[in-house]
Image (cartoon, rainbow, N blue to C red):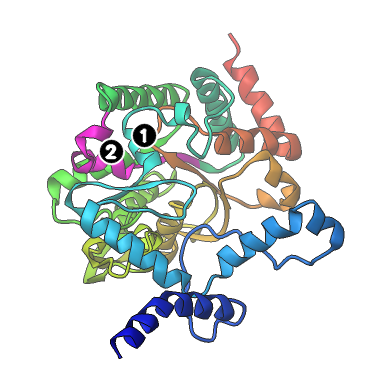
Amino acid sequence: MRGFAKFLLLLLPWLAALVVLFDTPYHRLSRGELTGVVEVQAIPRPSFRRFMDGTFQSELEAWFGQELSFKPAMVRTDNSLNLVVFHDISAHTRIPIMIGNDNTLFEMNYVNNTNAVSDIKGDPPPKSSYSIEEASRRMGLAARAFRALGMDFFLLMYPSKGWLWRERLPRRYLLPGGPRRAQDGYRHLVSLLRAEGVTVIDGAAAFEDLERRQPGLPLYNRGGTHWTDVGACQVARLVVAGFSDTEGRSELRCDVGHAQIAHRVDADLASLINVWDNRRFLDPIPSSKASLTAPLSGGPRRALVVGSSFSEHLLRALSEARAVGNVERLTYYRHSNRRRINWKRLMRRRNLVIFEQCQWSFLTANLTEFVDDLRRHDGDFAAAMKAAERAAAP
């Protein structure tokens, strides 16, 4: 009997492997999905030529690895062990995620931002091909052109999570002098833009001020990438205050509501690390309700927003308060997007333009490439840019 039990134990790993093998095409026993970057592989079609040159085998291996039965359970178990034993994580993402102090998750690009090496590391979105001075000059011309066409224009800098919570970054991730270079570079960019006549909404300074005045206000979730609705609403107040015709008659008010554990976009990083229990990375996040103290004269602004995924929270507050309406949003714009845009309709009847990016010490290609393409395809904007150039000429 003892020998038979040993024989069964010897067969057990083989039986488990057979179960995984036979269940992989059908998934009758294994359920669940992993979150993150998934490049879907279709099951390859066999052919003699592709079998002989090895293409079929490599594609079948990639498909099998993607469809492997019980894979979600195996990955989550492995990641959970790494977290508990080594205090380390792994995630199937294009941008690496690291764990900082106080169970705070950071994408590596925000660590690079804090060290002033984002452009050197090639973090997305890329730096503009123009120099900082030339990019600022062109943004100043665009600001004058938008205003000449009757549009308010703001360049909004959202605050980096790595910068605001740099004390939560492990010391080994902070380069000597990096935070000082990042701060000096950011201040230099803001000063250049303002010298060119650009209205800059400094979300980074606003968050630093909020953290001093209201230290308990959750501006980020530990397991999230983006600012919270509460934090974004506070910056949205600065946008409304900058409207050209409000003159203090209407302000945006942010009422803080009941808190619930972070979920969905507020917990995106916590979801991406694919562990069995990510509660240590989830904070109670209060809701936020935005409203105007008085209706805007002329109604909600017809807005164009060019920026990143952070604009979603910002627009949620502005739209809820009826400060903006009829919004066109372009996320991570590049030259390759221009064919999908109806340029004749894009700027029609707009009276608000918001450009948005992180608090880098440079302007991104998203913004400068959009300005260049708008000038090529919109005659009114091109004429306004020419007039601004003539006015700025010595």
Question: What range of the chain is rendered magenta?
Answer: 153-174
Amino acid type for the residue under numbered disc 1: Asn
Alpha-carbon span between mark 2 and mark 1: 7 Å
Q: Determine whether the residue tagged by mark 2 lies in a helix, strand or loop.
A: helix
The quarter of the picture where the N terminus appears is: bottom left
Residue type pointed to by label 2: Trp
Q: Nearer the viewer, residue 380 or 202?
A: 202
Relative to 191, residue 246 above or below: below
Residue 369 image-quadrant placement: top right
Disc 2 + disc 1, Cβ < 8 Å: yes
Q: In this view, does 51 lie to the left or right of 162?
A: right
Tell me, yes or no, if residue 122 can be seen here: yes
Q: Where is residue 244 in the image (x, y as percent from the top left)?
A: 44, 43
Instruction: Report x, y in % for residue 213.
Output: 13, 47
Label disc, if present, on residue 113 of the rendered structure: 1
Classify mark 2: residues with Cα within 10 Å, few (<14), some (14-19) or many (20+).
many
Residue at 26% from the left image edge and 44% from the top image edge: 207
Query: Which residue: 33% across, 42% down?
Result: 159
Q: Residue at x 48, y 36 (%)?
A: 123
Q: Is residue 181 magenta?
A: no
Considering the image in quadrants, where does the C terminus appear? top right
Label 1, residues with CA under 10 Å away: few <14, some 14-19, many ≥20? many
**324 up-or-down from 204: above or below:** below
Q: Residue at x 20, y 42 (%)?
A: 209
